Image (cartoon, grey):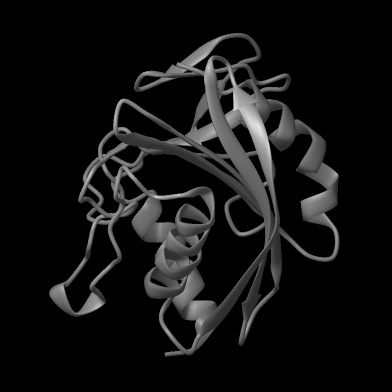
Amino acid sequence: MPVRVTLAMLCALLVSGCTAYSAVKPGTVLVGALQLNPSLTWSAAPNTGTNYTNCQTQVWTLDGLLLNRLIIVPGVDDGKPIFNQGRESQALPVFESDMLANEVEELVESSIVKLFGEGQVAVQTEKLRPNRFGDNRGFMFDMLVSVSDGPDYSGIAGAFIHEQQLYLLIYLGAEPYYFEKRREQAQVIIKSARI
């Protein structure tokens, strides 16, 4: 299946069941137990009814999901995947609460590869660095997602573990323009994350 079609299907799956986008205004916003502070108004795509994201996961965008998206995954339980499995053959890797930062980085990398489809995308992560999220020690890393038939994406991810649950934010923006265009606004949200 061409990657452009796969990417479009992924976007559709992330927001299936949506009837309209809703505005996420600047200020304090709660996503599950996760508190965020966007500095701009983002558009949240409702994802109720999807088989690929849990009910608390939200996907926000400033310019449209194919151009940029912020995936907010609050509270992944020990032994569960970051994204829900659509089919048994997908075999998504699972989060373990005793994972080290580099292991969570690898988990994100392999989860995105499985979700997009092996052989259709290559994910490279780099610059793993510590970051504080309120009272929680966490980390951030950069990403490059190369799609075989479509735009490449650059990204930033931030994550921390609190009470044996993983809290994760992933920003992806299309290259060469949209990643840098919205990078600062996405970093503000990622760095503001706290319980």
Q: Quadrant of residue 62?
A: top right
- Placement of 119 over or under 175, stated as above or below: below
Quadrant in the picture for the N terminus: bottom left
| Left or right position of 138 against 77 | right
Please provide percent x and percent y for residue 131.
Answer: 66, 32
Please provide percent x and percent y for residue 41.
Answer: 66, 23
Q: Residue at (22%, 55%) from the top-left corner?
A: 51
| Left or right position of 23 against 38 | left
| Left or right position of 193 against 125 | left
Badge count = 0
Which of these two is toward me, 168 or 60? 168
Q: Quadrant of residue 134?
A: top right
Please provide percent x and percent y for residue 178.
Answer: 79, 54
Which of these two is toward me, 181 or 72? 72
Quadrant in the picture for the C terminus: top left
- Placement of 69 over or under 27, stated as above or below: below
- Placement of 117 over or under 96, stated as above or below: below
Please provide percent x and percent y for residue 177.
Answer: 85, 58
